[in-house]
Amino acid sequence: MTAFKNIYILLIISLANVANIVKAQDAPWPSSISPQTNLQNQPKTFEKFKDRLYSGGTVGAWFGSTTYINLSPILGIKITKQFSVGVGVIYNYYSQMYIGKKYVSTIYGGSTFARYFVTENLFAQIGWDRLSVPDYTTGLINSRAWIDNVLVGAGYRQKFSDNGTVVAMIFYNINQSPLSPYQNPIIQIGFNIGL
């Protein structure tokens, strides 16, 4: 739990500095570089706030005697060209027929993440998920527990349009617990679309 608190405090401190980073993006051009100098080689600028925003996430499902549905939308904001932060919602539905009875469980909660692009398409990411899960350890019917997962990993994105990318990611949950729905390593495939 102490490791989680330290990571949580570090994440809060990092997010507190976001305002300073965003303000630095609006700094005037250095006197040695004019806005007209080599415009073709200049990176795309964030002309409007919405240029900083992107959405996406993961969606998955299978149906049959076992039904599984995963909805995990995200909303992110680019702080710089390489660094972004975001939030998300997580919902998983699972049902299975077993000896003529239907068993149903749900997992829901929220997430935050910070992503840094090492190259144009390769990134490192740290995230925190807080999930409400069925608690089978109590022996009580419909008992639930809130658990925290700290996910550290990397990903790769591939563009499919000017504003859209497919994203493949691999994570390791460094705060693994018996109730965690994740099994290490965690592999996810999703998408991001600029707004």
Image (spheres, grey):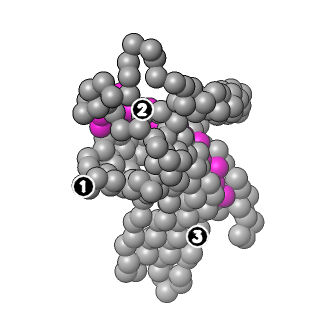
Quarter that holds the C terminus: bottom left
Asked if the residues shown at circle 1 and circle 2 are in contact, with their CB atoms under 8 angstroms apart, the answer is no
Q: Kindly identify which numbered label has been placed on residue 160.
A: 1
Of mark 2 and mark 3, the one earlier in the sequence is 2
Q: Is the residue 126 above or below the residue 194 in the image?
A: above
Crowding at mark 2 (Cα within 10 Å: few <14, some 14-19, many 20+): few
**Residue type (three-letter) at the residue carrying disc 1:** Phe
Q: Residue furthest bottom?
A: 100
Q: Is residue 118 magenta?
A: yes
Of mark 1 and mark 2, the one earlier in the sequence is 2
Circle 2 sits on which residue? Answer: 82
Tell me the residue at 47%/65% (across/down).
70
Our reading of the magenta stretch's main secondary structure is strand
Q: Which is more foreground, mark 1 or mark 3?
A: 1
| Nearer to us in this view, 79 or 93 | 79
Tell me the residue at 71%/61% (across/down).
144
**Residue type (three-letter) at the residue carrying disc 2:** Gln
Q: Is the residue 147 above or below the residue 101 in the image?
A: above
Magenta-highlighted residues:
114-132
Circle 3 sits on which residue? Answer: 105
Pinpoint residue 138: horizontal percent, then vertical percent.
Answer: 73, 58
Quarter that holds the N terminus: top right
| Nearer to us in this view, 150 or 179 | 150
Q: What separation in Å lies between label 1 and label 2 (alpha carbons)?
A: 19 Å
